[in-house]
Image (tube, rainbow, N blue to C red):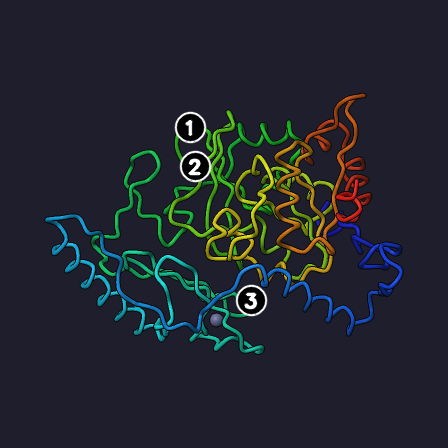
Amino acid sequence: MPLQARLRAPLFQRPCLLAPNTSSDLPSIDRPNNFLLHSLQSLWRISLRSNGFRSFCNPRSAKPTVKADVGEEEGEEEEGKTAFAKLKQKIEALGINSDSCTPGVYDHLYCPKCKGGKSIHRSLSFHINRNWSYALWRCFNLQCGWAGKVFADTKKAYPVVGRHGKLTSSWPLTMESLRLQMLGNELLAYFAERMISKETLERNKVMQVAGDQKIIAFTYRQNGHLVGCKYRTIEKRYWQERNTEKYLYGLDDIAEADEIIIVEGEIDKLSLEEAGYCNCVSVPSGAPQTVSLKEIPSPEKDTRFQYLWNCEDYLDKASRIILATDGDVPGQSLAEELARRLGRERCWRVHWPKKDEANSFKDANEVLEYLGADALRDAIDNAELYQMQSLD
Ligand SMILES: [Zn+2]
């Protein structure tokens, strides 16, 4: 059956954005009330942004960072200056004004291609590394999506040494440069055991690495283009393609979504698709052991959750976010860290069904595998408002 036909629409039919009785002075909001919805979305936008600030207007030192090792100091400084001049020239040739940029952080600039789109905002996420050897960028205006990378010295930047010590030159990322091919029968059988169909694997462009080893490749895409890749062996060894920015897995599936589901692994995202939900993304890396007691760092310093900031425009649009992370302690910590950043008021939490008296199923894939798609749908449909859970 084609996927579209399996989707139940609309996915969520609750009439309220807020729980009806969280507070007596909060209005009950019907979906079509666009003005209120818009106001709330603006608030949420503030909640995601106000935790840190982007001082993109600050004139900052544009000097390259140079190590001060005695003896090498002069040579390195020369090298740094050359890299700086070369890179600066290349960036300018692209029409990007990087004067306000600080090496080592992600700045938001005006995009020279789309000029910020209709809303005229700084849609270009732009990054120069600390020693000025390269710059990379991506425009978050959906109609634009301009992205690229430029090196101060092309010879020096390539080839990059890959994880296994092999030389790779994988930028720009393509199926060829990553040596990806269609999943073979062995890995298709592995997924079938986990109740993931060939149809779902194909739609999500799950591949394998060419060669004898059975290495699954989860391709990360934005507007259909490869932006990253995560590898996994059957023995559950994971690694990611180097030199890529972090994004949510399945990002294109939430481009138009008002309600989204966030899970903790790529296979959980595929599992939800088997249950009929396409509006789902997975975090790219695992869960933290505990919830941080500190304040949320500024976006530049929030390295562990950089993927949220990189996907900010997609997340801002959602009015309801269902956190369907694992049921264990790290999974709960992840849900809390996500809710802190996304705004608890629009987050809902899934509780996985009981396995026996003492234990619950761990994640979406386990529920699908042991109880089936209906049970997985029930768990999602019965998500509770996040605040209600945190009051327990
Ligand atoms: Zn643009």
Q: Which comes before the other along the chain, label 3 or label 1?
A: 3
Q: Amino acid at mark 1?
A: Gln
Q: Are marks 2 and 1 in contact (CB under 8 Å)?
A: yes
Disc 3 secondary structure class: loop
Looking at mark 2, is its residue's CB closer than 8 Å to ligand 1? Answer: no
Q: Which residue is mark 2?
A: 209
Percent across and percent down for residue 373 are 76, 36
Image point (86%, 57%), residue name:
23
Q: Is residue 250 above or below residue 98?
A: above
Q: Amino acid at mark 2?
A: Val
Residue 123: numbered disc:
none
Q: Are marks 2 and 3 in contact (CB under 8 Å)?
A: no
Residue 213: numbered disc:
1
Q: Which comes before the other along the chain, label 2 or label 3?
A: 3
Cα distance between the residues tagged 2 and 1: 8 Å
- Left or right for 31, reference 53: right
Q: Amino acid at mark 3?
A: Leu
Looking at mark 1, is its residue's CB closer than 8 Å to ligand 1? Answer: no
Q: Which residue is mark 3?
A: 142
Which quarter of the rendering shows the N terminus? top right
